[in-house]
Amino acid sequence: MFDLRVPLQNPRPDCDAFLRAVTTPWEPDRPRLVEYLFNPPLMKAVLAELGREWVEPTSDTASQKAYWDNAIAFWHHMGYDYVRIEICLPFSGLTGRKSEALHRNFEETHGGPIQSWEDFEAYPWPDPAKAWLFPYEYVNAHLPEGMGLFANHGGGPFEWLSKLMGYEALCMALFDDPDLVAAIANKIGSLCEAYYAQLLQLENLRAVFPGDDMGFRSGTMIAPDDLRKYTLPWHKRYAQMTHDRGLPYFLHSCGKIFDIVPDLIDDIGIQAKHSYEDAILPASEFKKRYGDRIGVLGGVDVDKLTRLSAGELRSYVRGVIDACAPGGRFAVGSGNSIPDYIPIENYLTMIDEALR
């Protein structure tokens, strides 16, 4: 099916090389590969090329093992140096719409399960001590030689704050009841802290790589000072815990968040940032501004990854590499993630060009 050099038949992962490539000025012979998320249709197609049958995970242990064996095989044979997992605590009562066909959720922005102090007190907060850690533990114990585990709590403190309150309700509460916002933010933050404390015990964990979308096309989702008050202190705490273990702390955050990038670098201490959109700021420009201080993860604009022809895409990917690879602190991949509307051939073309 695929007339390209991927999936690789004899991958040689090297997580040490990846971490060196994205956190130091070292320039490897080829850029290391990075990705954040994949939707199942792409994984199914690649696994079929490897002669592996897709298994939908259910609650039974056998299907879970088969699913995560497939996930490991996918990341391994696509040339990545790590397997990234994100599973969140079971926050309940969220509204919105889920599309099984599109493999994505559509969130309700008007409100959420917590709108008042009464809601806050009555909310069934999840217990981190009872968190389901089987996927992390299984992958940790079954990684191919040379690969590492990148783990995180699914969703960051801002994302969960905006989900539990609803984005519009959060924006109004910042003025009407900031004490309630602080209480919810601190509850979320402390629960995630306890979750991270468990993840950091995994012996093959090599990086913490959370996602917390704090921006949109023209600015941050809430005022930068509010992010500094309610959200960034928790990222600082998670980064400190990670650094105390001797590991790097990366961050995926969409949108135009340049007002808080100095906070991310100087105060929180992230070692690399993921998520770039050419319409906001191309990865090449971010590299010029900050590439001597933190790593650039990804950079291939998702719109171009979706729409360009194979030849145009190769040229574009090569341009991203040529602009971002000098001086190190770079890994190539999508600017955001690989949803199912990206043609599989285009994703494979990006990887194929990066491996040259």
Image: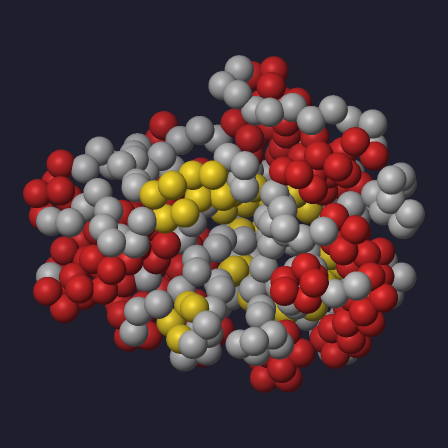
Q: Quadrant for residue 310, please give it.
A: bottom right
Depth order, front residue of 281/294: 281
Compared with 183, 266 (above or below) is: below
Q: What is the tally of numbered marks visible in this picture?
A: 0
Residue furthest left in the image? 118
- Residue 221 percent location from the top left of the image: 35, 67
Compared with 208, 191 (above or below) is: above
How is the structure coloured here? Answer: secondary structure
Q: Is residue 225 visible?
A: yes
Left or right, residue 344 beside residue 163: right
Q: Is residue 205 visible?
A: no
Depth order, front residue of 301/132: 301
Depth order, front residue of 237/108: 108
Which quadrant is the C terminus positioned in?
A: bottom right
Left or right, residue 165 beside residue 337: left
- Residue 278 percent location from the top left of the image: 60, 74
- Residue 102 percent location from the top left of the image: 54, 42
Depth order, front residue of 46/145: 46
Q: Residue at x 56, y 76 (%)?
A: 279
Left or right, residue 356 beside residue 97: right
Which quadrant is the N terminus positioned in?
A: top right
Q: Residue at x 36, y 48 (%)?
A: 107
Q: Residue at x 83, y 32 (%)?
A: 50
Q: Quadrant for residue 149, please give it.
A: top right
Q: Residue at x 75, y 37 (%)?
A: 45
Compared with 174, 64 (above or below) is: above
